[in-house]
Amino acid sequence: MPCLSLIPPPPPHAQFGVGFYSAFLVADRVTVQSRGCEGDDDKQWVWEAQAGSHQYKVYEDVEGGSGDTALARGTRVTLHLKEDAAELADPVRLARLIKQYSQFISFPIKLYSMKKEPVKVVDDEATKRKQEAEDKKAQEKGEEAKKVDPVLKTDYKEVWDWRVENENKPIWTRSPKVRRRWWCGGAEVAMGRARGRRRRGPWRTTQCWGACMCGCRT
């Protein structure tokens, strides 16, 4: 097949895996900004492609290579979502997907999301009522009214920040006691359902058969 020799191999910066190209299922355009951590080249580069296109562009990131958008090093992947995939920009939806599929990844996955934090603020209405009661009490006694301390109430403010979503450690990195309890509990429930007897309530669980997955031989 001589025609294959006419097709040059893709350059290293254009070689991505199937998992990366699946981003075009939800994005019209994908932009990859990258800056190396070694060498004398301090330039920031961009790889960009449109969904449905067989072409891509690679160019120096002149605008994004400086200022707040500049990378110290590493890579930033930006998905320009399709209209029917806008729900994937919802922080709640993203957090649920991360916990479902990436909970035990050791590398921290951070999500820029909103969290409501309690703060103490002055309750103007309650402070006004308290001052009126103090004024009335001082007037009855013929004394000069004193200024009361402000009444505080708890309010909540929205704080946006980067938060780690995969804080749980993988089961194989936990202590042996925790691993044994986890494996035994899972095997006990599974085997109890398989051979349990029906009583007044749910299926009755039994102990593990022989050597369970943790080797405790219960």
Image: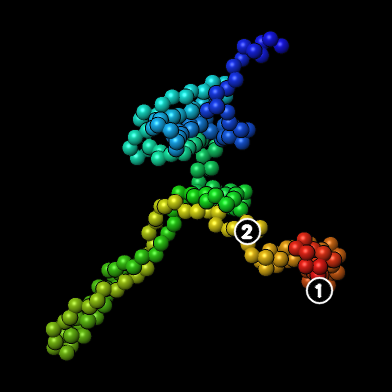
* Residue that appears at 85% across and 66% down: 210
Residue at (73, 63) in percent of width and height: 183
Where 128 sits versus 63, above or below? below
- Is disc 2 placed on a helix, strand or loop? helix
Q: Residue furthest bottom?
A: 141
Q: Which corner quadrant of the image does residue 169 belong to? A: bottom right
Q: Which residue is mark 1?
A: 200
Observer-nearest residue: 198 or 33? 33
Where residue 170 sits, quadrant-wise, is bottom right
Lateral position of residue 204 relative to residue 180, left or right = right
Query: As displayed, is residue 187 above or below residue 111?
Result: below
Q: CA distance from mark 1 to mark 2?
A: 39 Å
Q: Amino acid at mark 2?
A: Thr
Instruction: Give me the disc on residue 24.
Output: none
Q: Tell me the quarter of the image containing the N terminus.
A: top right
| Residue 125 image point, x, y percent | 29, 70
- Residue 200 at x, y percent in the picture: 81, 73
Q: Earlier in the sequence, mark 1 or mark 2?
A: 2
Give the residue type that dot 1 points to. Answer: Arg
**What count of labels does the image hold?**
2
Q: Residues within 10 Å of mark 1 (few under 14, many from 20)?
A: few
